[in-house]
Image: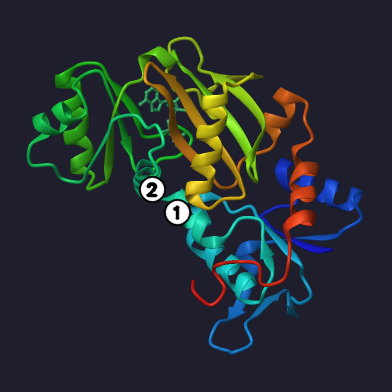
Amino acid sequence: MKIAILSRRSSLYSTRRLVEEARQRGHDVRVIDTLRCYMNIASHKPEIHYRGENLTGYDAVIPRIGASITFYGTAVLRQFEMMGVYPLNESVAISRARDKLRSLQLLSRKGIGLPVTGFAHSPDDVEDLIRMVGGAPMVIKLLEGTQGIGVVLAETQKAGESVIEAFMGLKQNILIQEFIKEAAGADIRCLVIGDKVVASMMRQAQEGEFRSNLHRGGSARAIKITPEERSTAVRAARAMGLNVAGVDILRSHHGPVVMEVNSSPGLEGIETATGKNIADQIIAFIEKNARPDHTRTRGKG
Ligand code: ADP
């Protein structure tokens, strides 16, 4: 097959691994720098040009679209879809997953476990907002944050009010969540491919930190998950419409709760922690599922 990987750089671990395994399985694979693509969107024959070349003949495209380029990245991916190229994850699904609020609303509609969560922009009654999510301690998040930046634990009512008021001053959308204390600074990353969790790891926050992001100094190890966690992760990926996803779960007193569904999950942490060849399984999934015009997005956007 002829496979395109949309990625800013071929030296990135996940991109490099996908290239390696695709070649290993006998495919013709090429890394395409998403931001360098330009497109003719008005033509009845959609085209993508890259370094002066008209990209044609691709069977599948693997989007590795960073959070900072979601808008342009999903537009390029949509163009591939309109050309009938099979996307590993569809553009609409990526857009859904990138919007924290939209994701939580979709997950909640499907009855998937979530932390009690409030959403606000400029609440006129902060006390009531805090009461709505069960009071202190609470976690307050900037909707736009990533890698744990903009995620604050407020241990008292007063601290919560101050943080919310400060965020309001920034004219930002904010999420207020019950603090899952019992997770004890650990979260579980489930790597979903199709309808299976193929690998899972537990990330533990550094001493004195509640955020387990590896970028914040957390450490990771392979972990066996429960059937309930497994089904939560698979249902969460399906609710987003993602074929491949990294589903982050916390272990709460009221069962597994989903934090986030990631549409371009990094492979380095999970391959290292579990010793599994995830890149190979992703390519195998594409071989099994890629067919021309096999996207619901075609013609819709
Ligand atoms: P980001 O998307 O920026 O990584 P998250 O919402 O995933 O932000 O939060 C970062 C980390 O903080 C999570 O992986 C988790 O360890 C911790 N965390 C976030 N929300 C809660 C919560 N409600 N209760 C307990 N821990 C939380």
Give residue 228's position: percent from left, percent from top. 52, 26
Q: Ligand 1 within 8 A of label 1's CB?
A: no
Name the residue furthest top: 207
Q: Residue tagged by mark 1?
A: 96
Quadrant housing residue 17: top right
Q: Residue tagged by mark 2?
A: 106
Q: Tag 2: Cα neighbours inside 10 Å, few (<14), some, or many (≥20)?
A: some
Q: Amino acid at mark 2?
A: Leu
Q: Ligand 1 within 8 A of label 2's CB?
A: no
Q: Amino acid at mark 1?
A: Arg
Q: Check the image and report above or below for 95 versus 133.
A: below
Local SS, label 2: helix
Question: Mark 1 or mark 2, which is nearer the start of the sequence?
Answer: 1
Q: Using the numbered discs, state the Cα–Cα distance from disc 2 to disc 1 in whole angstroms.
A: 9 Å
Local SS, label 1: helix
Q: Tag 1: Cα neighbours inside 10 Å, few (<14), some, or many (≥20)?
A: many
Identify the residue at horizontal 80%, vertical 43% (top origin): 280
Q: Quadrant of the N terminus?
A: bottom right
Observer-nearest of 53 and 103: 103
Q: Check the image and report above or below for 66 versus 38.
A: above
Quadrant housing residue 144: top left
For discs 2 and 1, the disc positioned in front in the rendered view: 2
Quadrant housing residue 177: top left
Name the residue furthest bottom: 44
Are the residues tagged 2 and 1 within 8 Å (C-beta)? Answer: yes
Identify the residue at horizontal 73%, vertical 24% (top origin): 274
Identify the residue at horizontal 54%, vertical 61% (top origin): 91
